[in-house]
Image (cartoon, rainbow, N blue to C red):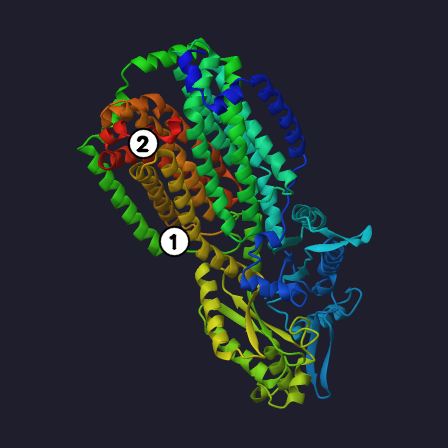
Amino acid sequence: MSQNDQEEATFMERLVFNHRLTVVVLFALVTLFLGYQATKVRPDTSFEKMIPLEHPYIVNMLEHQDDLASLGNSIRIAVSIKEGDIFSSEYMETLKRINDEVFFLPGVNRAGLRSLWTPNVRWTEVTEYGFDGGPVASRPSYETEDDLDELRINVLKSGEIGRLVANNFKSSIIEVPLQEYYPNPENQSELMRLDYGQFSDMLEQKIRNEFQDENPNIQIHIVGFAKKVGDLIEGLTAVMLFFAVAVGITFCLLYWFTWCIRSTISVLVTTLIAVVWQLGLIHLVGFGLDPYSMLVPFLIFAIGISHGVQKINGIALQSGGADSALMAARRTFRQLFLPGMIAILADAVGFIALLILDIGVIHELAIGASLGVAVIVFTNLIMLPVAISYMGISKRAIERSKRDAVREHPFWRALSNVAHPRLAPVIVILGLVAGVGSFLYQKANLQIGDLDPGAPELHADSRYNLDNDFIISNYSTSSDILVVMVETPLEMCSAYKTMEAIDQLEWRMNNVPGVQSTVSLVTVAKQVIMGNNEGNLKWQGLSRNQDNLNTAISRAPEGMFNSACSLAPVLIYLNDHKAETLERAADEVKAFAEEYDTDTLKFKLAAGNAGIEAATNEIIATSELTILVLVYIWVGAMCLFTFRSFPATICIVLPLILTSVLGNALMAFLGIGMKVATLPVIALGVGIGVDYGIYIYSRLESFLRAGMPLQEAYYQTLRSTGKAVLFTGLCLAIGVATWIFSAIKFQADMGLMLTFMFIVNMFGAMLLLPALARFLINPEKIRNKKESFLQH
């Protein structure tokens, strides 16, 4: 090293490059260890990780989960017959076998299983002797016409038409409540957690495929949380294909950028090692891969490539004037390590801010992604320059870099005009108009929550959504159920005041747009009281006589009240689970509770799948702005700490804010709601997008300090780092653009949004940043001030 280089070398540079062999050995050992850990990572999710456990709705639901077994985590299996109807020997025998097969699946709450073959599905009728009733399927088999006629009569008297039995009598449903934890069959004292991927696979292999293949006249449709998650896990196994495609495309682009196979392989290998480290670390902290965190390796790969490109570009520029590859690597490390660190810290904050969102899968995504970003410091900021110091860069790449350093670049010269006094105001005004217009549009049109029926995480033509469409089309009751839990003292759920209040709630909810119907203990009591009075419709009401009420509820089916008569759920069937439908229904229940709640009577939200979605929407609505504000405050603080300049901070942060507003407007335009799958996109786009601004401004400031006017300084910035920034934007975008073709809709939505944000952030840094600098940055002040933090 020259005397000047020795004096300028930082402590970190000396620590790394004076002990290169030690660094390589340690790096190899850590890679072997974490690579072994990465092989143990498995798909892993649970019902509780997908919901906001601290939200009052979910707290209430979990408090009463033992009394609401069939209203929490459950699936519905619709068994249909193509030719004929359910009143046939063929259908009933198949249904019985499917019912028995489902009964023994791991994780099934067998006591709550309901179908035409289970004894808890009963018929009731009023006779001259009083009430009569029994199980709908009272015979071991149905072979004769007389037996089938009896079955038909029992079904008609059961009240299950439109609920458990299709309106056209061509299918019936098996309702399957699930247990998150269930006894290990081999050791009853040990609890096992339900494996959703395995459970979904069992449903496909043992239920759908086996019975449909055996009898082509039978068609099976399955919906429910567990099946949806299982389909997501199945679809996300295709992620490896997308990852391979992204690696292949990136390899070609890297070689086109560097003209050096050694550099290309070095960047790819160190970045892939970063992905391996990240997977190994998430296993060490006890996480698996769920439908959301499966996307993190893509992000780590894209971020690693972007920083690797900056390093290779810097080393190529330094190689022209350095005596050796080692010297070029050291100078590049000295120049770019701290800007890279600041950019990575800004990346990390986009992930860390997501911890505010009280949902387990998002917490794991945030922690896993933060670990992945942290390892990029070691793989791409430290190990990559060390590797290049040994391998060097091809002469062809060095010669190309030398030619680029001396020749005029018409494209960069033209682009530098955005810092011209005449063009800069136009750029700023266009940015302002785009920002204000997009803000007003997204404010009027962007909604919280799901905007489509079925499972919006999956495409409309997916198997799950087609199954859901079948059930919606053939049954009267919706699959979207909001449950209000009515709490009373012990043995008071049937008191007249309680029943009368529930009756009022049902009446009010039935008049709310978006509500199909309601069912509760009161619904049953009215029917029984009417039946006890010769079926006269005039008696279809609540009696003030407590003995009559007690008799009426004694015939209520399981789930209408708990064993202590201290909880009576009200089931509210909704047309859909769109955000506005859930908000209307929840607001009406809250208003009712404020009016009717007493010390002994409480109306509490909420259980059912619609209740869970309503809680999630509220969490997102309250967290969205907080997350963005925290991201911007942290990014701004990092920029201020780095450049010691408020104007510089504004120049870097304003393009990010514009991109966030444009991203929200795009979501509104495409009909994508702000939900668990899309909220992380905005935070990630800001955190990752700041890389462009930091790299550009750090070079711009160095040229301004050298005495150049703003436009010339920006031209020199583009010559030295513009190609790398442009390439970085393309690599980031390509890394996630492959998601757009995913069979999983939420992954495709995230891919589209991130691609848009990475590209727009890149153009914001290259166009809007220098235009803002024309108004905010004083070159004379830059020249006279002390060196910034980055030069120390």
Residue 478 appears in view: no
Instruction: Identify the secondary structure beneath mark 1.
Output: loop
On screen, residue 61 versus residue 761, left or right, reads right
Residue 766 disc label = 2
On screen, residue 525 versus residue 313, left or right, reads right
The image shows residue 335, relative to residue 490, as above or below, that is: above
Seen at 52% across and 13% down, the residue is 391
- Earlier in the chain: of badge 1 and badge 2, it is 1
CA separation in Å, label 1 and label 2: 28 Å
Residue 630 appears in view: yes
Q: Are marks 1 and 2 in contact (CB under 8 Å)?
A: no
The residue lying toward the viewer, choosing from 691 and 551, is 691
Residue 446 disc label = 1
The image shows residue 265, relative to residue 97, as above or below, that is: above
Seen at 70% across and 46% down, the residue is 205
Q: Which amino acid does the dot numbered 2 rest on?
A: Met
On the image, the x and y values in percent for residue 742 come to: 52, 39
Q: Quadrant of residue 759?
A: top left
Figure label count: 2
